[in-house]
Image (cartoon, rainbow, N blue to C red):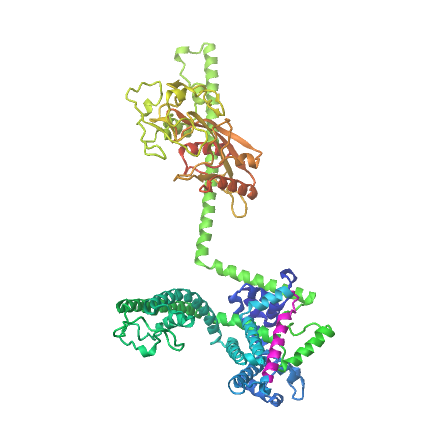
């Protein structure tokens, strides 16, 4: 990206961008942010790796061979030859004493000196444990103690080293995040424990054992040096991840080992009371069986009574299985132990061990795919550690610790060796560097945009956008031409009308003066013919459609298996006689609703209902005036529906509802309103309710009993909560709803709520309120046109709203 462009132009400036301390980033650097985010792609960049290599070699040239460096490290007078080259010109003269300091303060030299020192420590430690471990410590053992003291001092320095001013708490947390620091602390604590036991005469041998364990941990610490190798470095990551796999695998293995061990011990041995032999029989022998060491007595064939203790009294022999007193043969069921052994080996050797191998293989492949990136990423931690480390190796590092203590504690001098990884620039230098970065960033973005324009998919998108614009321009031109023709036709009609009136006046004047008679006068078109009513296509369309409800006569009633009685259009009005009309009765029971009319209507319960008035909290008045009540049941004012009862509605008679039609202008990404045929386009808020496959306007009947004509259900209560300042009523009356029946129907008030200016806060409040009412409710914005997938009755409401707002439909 941008850093690649900067590194291509100027390597030194690009490396300054990596180490520049930014106040806006919390006094950290770009490189440190990438490390904290574990961005391996950025850290493995060639420019970042070149900078790390430069830091690793210090003031020396990076092309010095490793063999030459080791030769000069072992025999330093070779530095005054041309064997080692330095980057700075002032270090090139042979008599310069600074060459010695520049060589031994390079992180690569400090690393190899510490490796040499650590190997010497381990060799001396092994010699003391195996050859020279006396009752009183010898001088090699005292040297080991002194060596360990220098290691402890170095760990304390690393723990308290805070050049960035993070604070003690954060520095300690960062220290213990490193796995190798935890291993160092563990090795030191085990060594100190062993040393304490070793100095006490009564615990000399346990102390030797603990020191041997400490030696193992110190040897494991050697793996850290492999991180410098491109080949072995990623393998350390693989080993660490495989250790996690083994840890979880042991839980599975322990189930089989313990279950088989307990069963085997209980079948073969009777009442073994020795705890150590119980552990051997249950865990140790079962574990060795996985690797082929099968007990010889488990099948009774190779049983030898001399290899065990009959009563369990011999501490060096296991207890014998229960035997027959006559022939001294074991009496346990041999066939059962053999079956258990076979099943155990089948699941452990074949299933579990192969599962472990598969887990190892997956971990290896996962790391192997990113070997180079992992090595380059972990290489930074190694370089940073030895860049901030004192140059002398242990135990001579104590001299450096003493120097640091004097400089930092007594003289109060700040640390200076960390500046190469973090640098605070002057204001002028920083401003020039940032200006250069911004300039290259703009060049990179322009080049990237040019590449995108040359992309085939981008070209297709541009062509499609241009075609849309061209289509809109053609529509605009067609509308202009059509409007011009219509204006000319209207002007021509006016002129013809005026000419007809003038001819009528002339003919009447001639007739009054005696020229011709009224019978001979030719007929002229009346003014009414000229002002003939224009054809309204939409009006004809509405007249062509049925004036009766359609959705309320769907054959299958929604939410049930009830079928309506078929009602033709001419039989819908109640005034028309329909002797064959025998509709079924259906009333759903809403257990979750507190207010609802009787489920099975009887004459006694129906007589308690007061229709055409306020019935307690329920408003049973219709927007269409008084409705007929027959046999205690109200009749649908719009006619028959083919179903009696109240269906899925809550009340007999009108069920009042409110449908807010929430709209906004459809906008482009830049915020401009989209137009089609010179008219603005709208977007309407639609919802999909549970157990429904179609989209509809939000709102509906109130579940609390319609206590007001303008009551708002929970789905529409957000209209009042948002406090919209401009609302417009577009419909008030009967709603053709699939739930309507002969005795219950929906009457609604449709209110238009339009957002002229986009307001994201109110949209979020509306959506959160709707989601809070019904978790399964799905809401979205839908483009408003004739093809919108809604109920036909809702489409009529949207058509009225678009006409009121002058929008496209």
x and y percentages locating residue 599 in the rendered image: 38, 28
For this rendering, which residue is in front, 390 or 596? 596
Picture quarter with the C terminus: top left
Q: At x 55% / y 44%, what residue is drawn?
A: 760
Q: Is residue 58 visible?
A: no
Report the magenta residues as a range: 142-167
Q: Is residue 172 above or below residue 117?
A: above
For this rendering, which residue is in front, 89 or 178? 178
Q: Is residue 348 visible?
A: yes
x and y percentages locating residue 285 in the rendered image: 37, 72
Q: How many marks?
A: 0
For this rendering, which residue is in front, 802 or 398? 398
Q: Is residue 510 above or below residue 434?
A: above
Quarter location, residue 387: bottom right
**Residue 749 lies in the magenta-colored region:** no
Residue situated furthest front in the rendering: 326
x and y percentages locating residue 471 in the rendered image: 45, 44
Q: In the image, is 218 to the left or to the right of 98?
A: left
x and y percentages locating residue 780 in the rendered image: 47, 42
**Residue 162 lies in the magenta-colored region:** yes
Magenta: main secondary structure: helix
């Amino acid at each position: 990206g941008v850093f690649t462009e900067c590194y291509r132009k100027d390597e030194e400036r690009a490396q300054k961008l990596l180490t520049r301390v930014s106040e806006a980033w919390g006094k950290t650097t770009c490189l440190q942010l990438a490390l904290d985010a574990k961005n391996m792609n950025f850290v493995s960049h060639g420019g970042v790796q070149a900078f790390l290599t430069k830091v690793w070699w210090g003031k020396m040239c990076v092309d010095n061979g490793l063999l030459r460096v080791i030769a000069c490290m072992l025999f330093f007078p070779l530095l005054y030859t041309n064997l080692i080259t330095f980057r700075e010109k002032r270090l090139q003269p042979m008599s310069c004493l600074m060459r010695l300091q520049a060589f031994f303060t390079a992180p690569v030299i400090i690393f190899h000196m510490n490796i040499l020192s650590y190997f010497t420590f381990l060799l001396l430690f092994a010699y003391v444990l195996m050859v020279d471990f006396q009752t009183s410590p010898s001088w090699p053992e005292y040297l080991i103690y002194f060596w360990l003291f220098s290691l402890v001092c170095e760990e304390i320095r690393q723990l308290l080293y805070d050049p960035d001013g993070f604070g003690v708490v954060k520095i300690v947390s960062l220290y213990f995040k490193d796995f190798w620091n935890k291993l160092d602390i563990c090795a030191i604590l085990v060594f100190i424990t062993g040393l304490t036991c070793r100095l006490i005469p009564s615990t000399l041998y346990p102390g030797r054992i603990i020191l041997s364990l400490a030696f193992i941990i110190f040897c494991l610490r050697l793996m850290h040096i492999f991180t410098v190798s491109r080949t072995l470095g990623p393998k350390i990551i693989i080993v660490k991840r495989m250790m996690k796999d083994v840890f979880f695998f042991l839980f599975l293995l322990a189930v089989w080992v313990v279950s088989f061990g307990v069963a085997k011990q209980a079948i073969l041995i009777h009442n073994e009371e020795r705890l150590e032999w119980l552990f051997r029989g249950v865990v140790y022998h079962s574990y060795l069986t996985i690797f082929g060491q099968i007990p010889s007595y488990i099948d009774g064939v190779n049983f030898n009574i001399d290899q065990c203790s009959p009563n369990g009294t011999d501490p060096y022999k296991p207890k014998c299985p229960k035997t027959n007193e006559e022939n001294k043969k074991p009496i346990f069921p041999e066939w059962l132990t053999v079956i258990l052994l076979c099943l155990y080996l089948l699941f452990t050797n074949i299933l579990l061990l192969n599962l472990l191998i598969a887990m190892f293989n997956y971990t290896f492949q996962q790391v192997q795919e990113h070997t180079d990136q992992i090595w380059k990423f972990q290489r930074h931690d190694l370089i940073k550690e030895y860049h901030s480390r004192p140059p002398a190796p242990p135990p001579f590092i104590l001299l450096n610790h003493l120097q640091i203590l004097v400089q930092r504690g007594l003289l109060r001098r700040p640390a200076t060796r960390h500046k190469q990884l973090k640098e605070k620039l002057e204001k002028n230098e920083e401003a020039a560097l940032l200006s250069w970065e911004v300039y290259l960033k703009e060049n990179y973005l322009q080049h990237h945009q040019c590449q995108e324009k040359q992309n085939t998919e981008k070209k297709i998108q541009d062509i499609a956008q241009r075609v849309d614009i061209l289509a809109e321009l053609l529509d605009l031109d067609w509308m202009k031409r059509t409007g011009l023709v219509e204006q000319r036709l209207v002007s021509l009609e006016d002129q013809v009308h005026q000419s007809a009136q003038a001819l009528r006046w002339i003919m009447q004047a001639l007739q009054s003066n005696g020229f011709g008679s009224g019978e001979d006068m030719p007929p002229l078109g009346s003014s009414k013919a000229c002002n003939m009513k224009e054809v309204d296509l939409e009006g004809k369309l509405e007249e062509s459609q049925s004036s009766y409800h359609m959705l309320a006569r769907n054959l299958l009633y929604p939410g049930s298996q009830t079928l309506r009685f078929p009602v033709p259009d001419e039989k819908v009005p109640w005034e028309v006689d329909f002797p064959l009309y025998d509709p079924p009765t259906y009333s759903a029971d809403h257990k979750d609703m507190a207010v609802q009319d009787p489920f099975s209507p009887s004459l006694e319960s129906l007589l308690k209902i007061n229709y055409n008035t306020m019935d307690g909290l329920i408003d049973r008045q219709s927007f269409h005036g008084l409705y007929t009540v027959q046999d205690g049941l109200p009749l649908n004012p719009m006619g028959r529906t083919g179903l009696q009862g109240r269906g899925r509605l809550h009340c007999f008679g009108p069920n009042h509802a409110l449908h807010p039609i929430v709209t906004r202008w459809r906008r482009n990404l830049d915020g401009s309103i989209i137009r089609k045929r010179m008219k603005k386009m709208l977007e309407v808020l639609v919802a999909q309710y549970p157990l429904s496959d179609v989209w509809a306007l939000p709102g509906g009947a109130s579940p609390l009993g319609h206590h007001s004509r303008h009551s708002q259900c929970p789905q529409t209560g957000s209209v009042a909560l948002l406090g919209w300042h401009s609302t417009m009523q577009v419909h008030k009356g009967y709603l053709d709803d699939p739930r309507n029946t002969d005795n219950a129907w929906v009457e609604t008030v449709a209110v238009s709520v339009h957002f002229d200016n986009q307001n994201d806060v109110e949209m979020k409040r509306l959506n959160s309120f709707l989601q809070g009412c019904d978790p399964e409710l799905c809401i979205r914005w839908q483009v408003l046109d004739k093809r919108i997938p809604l109920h036909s009755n809702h489409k009529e409401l949207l058509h009225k709203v678009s006409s009121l707002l002058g929008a496209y439909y």
